[in-house]
Image (spheres, grey):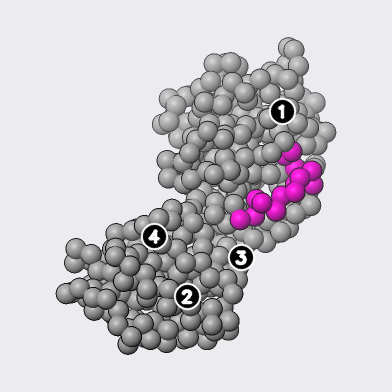
């Protein structure tokens, strides 16, 4: 994209799109790509790059910076809000281009700068609440740890209410020409925000809540995250969505039916559950075969819907691995507040449901029916037990 984009009089977008990487963090599919957002604040006295880009895109960022600043002018500061290498990977390249560039970050950030890149010297350690005047644009730093790493902070341009928020309020999806929400149809980014949140930030809900609490008195005119659009017109919608997700509030009364099945027997149980949920009036049902559905889709569905149904066979004296993987990921994210039903099948030893319970033990979930057990192929009684369980879940969701 044309990266030389003016966002305000003295803030330019200098980020990049990545439509090549298939798995973000080598884990999460990127069907619509991702942007690594970076910004340049130009004051009358000094200039600051806010966050970097991933290493292989460094040349594009440097070109954008040069185009904004013009001949003879150099960036003075690189403010690092977040050290994950999708934003910090190009630090050494920037330093080689501009050896006098001062890296500004908090104490943890500067330790990570040394640890990742061996970079020392020409650093500016900032603390919570510190300011850095650039001339007509004053940067104020707010430490917001664990959104998404311990060193994360946000930077506000005080005069303009422009907040560089790091991963908070970010989403998957590359930018398609425009950068600012008012210049695009940005509906497509909201499902990508739920998926991004569930995959990347989902474990750190209470820290997102702390950050939101800190921001509640800040007059934010423009929200500039490290991924996805810059938010102005829909900024309140974005902070509202992050607020709901970080409180583990479901976005609808639907159900994620997550199941695994080797030969189709447990699948019949999942289908019985889904069919009865639909008969009971549940309208938003996602039936997800854990063997064929990537983990990001399962996590996003579990965060989106108020109901969760899990059905899986026993496998090697435990739980069928794809379902175990999904439940472990939900447990890592401390999923809470969901109405849950469980169903397990087995051929000679019933281990699936106890393993499900063990995996979900750390989550604050409400099981609304006795788990269903099926021996070998589910008979009529077992399938009716699945329907009964689904009726209990539908009732709990009303
Ligand atoms: Fe976009 Fe946590 O890095």
Q: Residue furthest left?
A: 348
Question: Mark 2 packing: few (<14 Cα in 10 Å), some, or many (20+)?
Answer: many
Q: Are marks 4 and 1 in contact (CB under 8 Å)?
A: no
Q: Give the secondary structure at mark 4.
A: loop
372 shown above or below 168? below
Nearer to us: label 3 or label 1: 1
According to the picture, the residue beneath numbered tag 3 turns out to be: 244
Which image quadrant: the C terminus?
bottom right
Number of dots carrying numbers = 4
Question: Mark 4 packing: few (<14 Cα in 10 Å), some, or many (20+)?
Answer: many
Residue 62 screen position, x and y as percent: 63, 21
Q: Nearer the viewer, residue 300 or 330?
A: 300
The stretch in magenta equals 178-191
Q: CA distance from mark 3 to mark 4?
A: 26 Å
For ligand 1, tell me if the residue under mark 3 lies within 8 Å.
no
Q: Are marks 2 and 3 in contact (CB under 8 Å)?
A: no
One can see residue 53 in this view: yes
Q: Give the secondary structure at mark 3.
A: helix
According to the picture, the residue beneath numbered tag 1 turns out to be: 2
Nearer to us: label 4 or label 2: 2
Q: CA distance from mark 2 to mark 1?
A: 47 Å
For ligand 1, tell me if the residue under mark 2 lies within 8 Å.
no
According to the picture, the residue beneath numbered tag 4 turns out to be: 290
One can see residue 139 in this view: no
Q: CA distance from mark 4 to mark 1?
A: 40 Å
Q: Name the residue located 78 percent from the left edge and 36 percent from the top edge.
A: 7
Q: Name the residue located 52 percent from the left edge and 26 percent from the top edge.
A: 56
Q: Are marks 2 and 1 in contact (CB under 8 Å)?
A: no
- Tell me which label, 3 or 4, sits earlier in the chain: 3
Q: Is residue 268 left or right of residue 41?
A: left
Question: Mark 3 packing: few (<14 Cα in 10 Å), some, or many (20+)?
Answer: some
């Amino acid at each position: 994209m044309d990266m030389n984009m003016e966002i305000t009089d003295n803030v330019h977008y200098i980020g990049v799109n990545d439509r090549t990487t298939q798995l973000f963090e080598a884990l999460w599919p990127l069907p619509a790509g991702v942007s690594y957002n970076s910004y340049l604040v130009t004051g009358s006295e000094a200039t600051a790059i806010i966050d970097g880009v991933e290493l292989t895109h460094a040349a594009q960022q440097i070109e954008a910076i040069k185009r904004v600043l013009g001949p003879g002018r150099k960036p003075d500061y690189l403010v690092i809000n977040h050290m994950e290498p999708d934003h910090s990977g190009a630090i050494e390249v920037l330093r080689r281009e501009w050896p006098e560039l001062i890296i500004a970050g908090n104490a943890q950030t500067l330790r990570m700068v040394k640890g990742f890149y061996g970079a020392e010297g020409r650093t500016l350690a900032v603390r919570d609440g510190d300011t850095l005047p650039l001339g007509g644009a004053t940067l104020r730093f707010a430490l917001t740890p664990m959104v998404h790493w311990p060193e994360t902070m946000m930077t506000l341009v005080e005069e303009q209410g422009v907040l560089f928020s790091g991963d908070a309020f970010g989403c998957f999806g590359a930018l398609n020409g425009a950068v600012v929400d008012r210049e695009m149809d940005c509906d497509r980014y909201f499902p990508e925000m739920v998926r991004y949140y569930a995959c990347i930030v989902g474990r750190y809900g209470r820290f997102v809540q702390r950050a939101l609490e800190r921001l509640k008195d800040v007059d934010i005119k423009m929200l500039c995250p490290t991924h996805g659009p810059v938010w102005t017109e829909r900024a309140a919608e974005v902070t509202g969505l992050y607020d709901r997700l970080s409180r583990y509030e479901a976005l609808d009364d639907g159900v994620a039916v997550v199941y695994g099945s080797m030969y189709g027997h447990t699948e019949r149980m999942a289908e019985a559950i889904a069919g009865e949920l639909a008969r009971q009036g549940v309208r938003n049902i996602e039936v997800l075969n854990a063997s064929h559905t990537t983990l990001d889709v399962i996590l996003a569905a579990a965060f989106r819907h108020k109901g969760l149904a899990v059905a899986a066979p026993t496998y090697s004296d435990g739980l069928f691995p794809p379902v175990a993987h999904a439940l472990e990921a939900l447990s890592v994210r401390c999923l809470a507040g969901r109405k849950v039903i469980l169903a397990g099948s087995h051929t000679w030893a019933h281990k699936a449901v106890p393993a499900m319970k063990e995996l979900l033990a750390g989550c604050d979930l409400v099981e609304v029916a006795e788990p269903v057990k099926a021996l070998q192929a589910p008979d009529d009684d077992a399938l009716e037990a699945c329907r009964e369980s689904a009726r209990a879940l539908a009732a709990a969701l009303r």
